[in-house]
Image (spheres, rainbow, N blue to C red):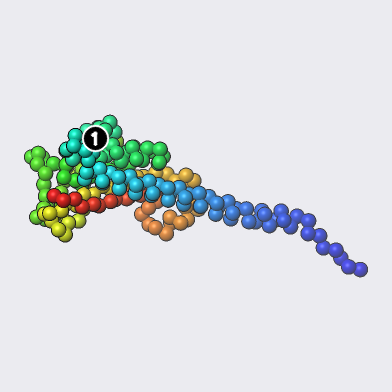
Amino acid sequence: MRLSKSNQGQSLVETALMLPLLVMLVLNVVNLGYFFAVVVNLSGGSRTSTIYAIEGGATPAAGAIPSSGGSSPTTNTGSVTYLAFQDLTGAVWNPTAASVQVCSQANINSSGSGVNTAGGALRANCETCTSSGCGSAGNGSPVPSADPEAPLFVTNRVDIQYTFPPLIRGAIFNIPLQAFTGICGSSGNCTFTRHVEMRAMN
């Protein structure tokens, strides 16, 4: 007499075994997609801000190069930092948590004049701004590299650094970023930095 084998419940057991793996995979993909969206928006914001730092309004009425941000960069509508924050508004979770460093000809030193270093290769006055205000010119870091064709050209640079929590917290849901040390810290927050350098005639 043959014994009949029953396979009732086999699908349920297989689903129960695979479900945690599938959930972990889906949540990693969601977090990775969010990280890519943040990087794209930071890159776009730094690019448009650098162009604005070089050209300003590019109209006959706007002859002066825009400032980095001044004492209130979130309301100083003509500043480079204001433009960066506007680019990030709606694109990232908390745009005012970003810090923006602007290295341009508009920054001045304590004596009120622009400073070139390396024989006019670049403007040394990099200014770091947050939503609460900007530091004094010359305190930014890193300073852009010297332009190879100075003093005819000057290098301008905008760095945007943004610290944010992942959509889904937990190391198990951020496996792709574990390979890159220094991006996500032990606190659970991740810090991305994007910069753009452009050259302009001096």
Q: Tell me the crowding category of disc 1: few under 14, some 14 to 19, or many 20 or more residues within 10 angstroms, Cα based.
A: some
Label 1 SS: loop
Disc 1 target residue: 78
Front residue of 153 and 100? 153
Residue 72 at x, y percent in the picture: 25, 32
Residue 62 at x, y percent in the picture: 19, 36
* Residue 145 position (above or below residue 70): below
Farthest left residue? 111
Front residue of 165 and 80? 80
| Apparent side of residue 63 relative to residue 174 in the rendered image (left or right) | left
Is residue 170 at all visible to an observer of this figure?
Answer: no
Front residue of 69 and 171? 69
Is residue 194 at all visible to an observer of this figure?
Answer: yes
Q: Residue at x 9, y 39 (%)?
A: 112
Pick the quarter of the image with the N terminus: bottom right
Farthest right residue? 1
Q: Residue at x 58, y 55 (%)?
A: 21
